[in-house]
Image: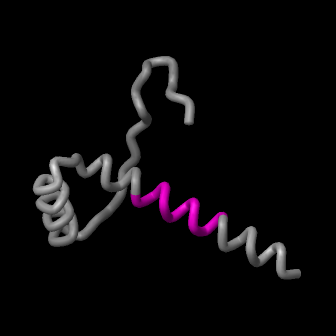
Amino acid sequence: MARPATGETPKHNVRVPKELWDAAMAEAKMEGRTITDVINSDLHRYVTRRRRERGAADGES
């Protein structure tokens, strides 16, 4: 994925319940990760899985 000319990854706003955000932050910290890393890796897994599922469904037609 290409970065903009500034070299910075674009920022996005999301709404997450405080309890979930705090728990995720604590887990990430215990793993030595940032919440950004956690979100990016989970979104990558989600997109990959959905694309794979759609591809399998398309192949069954």
- Horizontal side of 54 relative to 23 (left or right) equals right
x%, y% of residue 32?
16, 48
Q: Residue 14 or 40: which is nearer the viewer?
A: 40
Q: Which of the pair 5/43 is nearer the observer?
A: 43
Q: Relative to 57, is 46 above or below?
A: above
* Residue positioned most to the right: 61
Q: Position of residue 55 (x, y in %)?
A: 74, 68
Which of the 4 image quadrants contains residue 23?
Answer: bottom left
Image position of 59 (left or right of 3): right
Viewer-proximal residue among 40 and 11: 40
**Outermost residue toward the bottom?**
61
**Is 40 left or right of 47, judged from the image as shown?**
left
Report the predominant secondary structure element of the magenta stretch. helix
Q: Give coordinates of residue 9: x percent, y percent.
A: 42, 33
Residue for point 40% across, 60% down = 42
Residue 29 forms part of the magenta stretch: no
Q: Residue drawn 66% across and 73% down?
A: 53
Total labels: the figure holds 0
Question: Quick one: 11 or 1, which is closer to the camera?
Answer: 1
User: Could you tell me which quadrant the N terminus lies in?
Assistant: top right
In the depicted structure, whether residue 52 falls above or below residue 11: below
Q: Quadrant of the C terminus?
A: bottom right
Q: Could you tell me residue 51's position as x and y percent?
A: 65, 64
The answer to which image quadrant residue 60 occupies is bottom right
Q: In the current view of this chain or complex, which residue is farthest to the top?
A: 5
Q: Residue at 22% x, 47% y: name it.
A: 34
Type of colouring = one colour
Q: Which residues are magenta?
A: 42-51
- Would residue 12 be found to the left or right of residue 45 on screen? left
